[in-house]
Image: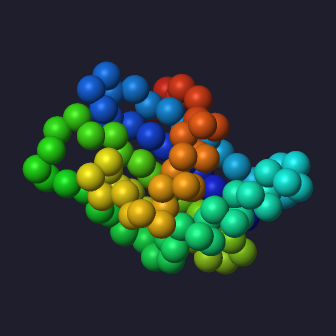
Amino acid sequence: MKLCFLQSGGFAGLVKGADFDTAALAPAQAKELESLVQQSAIAASGEFLSNAARDLHQYEITIEEGDRKISVTFDDANIPKSAKPLLGFLKKQARPKTLN
């Protein structure tokens, strides 16, 4: 499984992200990530953004597994409860990025 995470927005507008390939991770970390993805219940692509709030962080998660690809975008106001543990894991791993 491959996963791409991108966090943007917020008051300062910083961009952070991380890329994962479970084949390249330590077995324990790969198992943890796969479990968090499964528990997140992210099963379909979509965009879930709030029009009512400013300066919210936006999170993009793209999951590729075999020939299946799911891409979701949500902000702080629309984080599914089931996805919060996955998001916490991803945010800890994220590092500053520059967008080209």
Q: Residue at x 58, y 45 (%)?
A: 90
Count of labels shown?
0
- Residue 2 % position (x, y): 69, 59
Left or right: 79 in relation to 43: left
Give the image quarter of residue 23.
bottom right
Which residue is pictured at 27% across the width and 52% down the height?
77
| Location of residue 89 with respect to 49 vertically, above or below | above
**Colour scheme employed for the rendering of this structure:** rainbow
- Relative to 98, does residue 93 appear above or below in the rendering? below
* Image position of 90 with respect to 79: above or below: above
Left or right, residue 52 beside residue 82: left
Residue name at image x 11 percent, y 50 percent: 52
- Which residue appears farthest toward the left when viewing the image? 52
Q: Is residue 70 visible?
A: no
Snapshot quadrant of residue 3: bottom right
Q: Quadrant of the N terminus?
A: bottom right
Seen in the picture, residue 92 relative to 61 is either above or below; the reply is: above
Q: Nearer the viewer, residue 81 or 87?
A: 81
Residue 84, x across and y down, in percent: 48, 56
**In this view of the protein, can residue 69 be seen by the observer?**
yes
Query: In the drawing, does residue 57 fall left or right of residue 3?
Result: left
Q: Position of residue 32 (x, y in %)?
A: 74, 58
Q: Residue furthest top?
A: 12
x and y percentages locating residue 67 in the rendered image = 67, 77
The image quarter containing residue 38 is bottom right
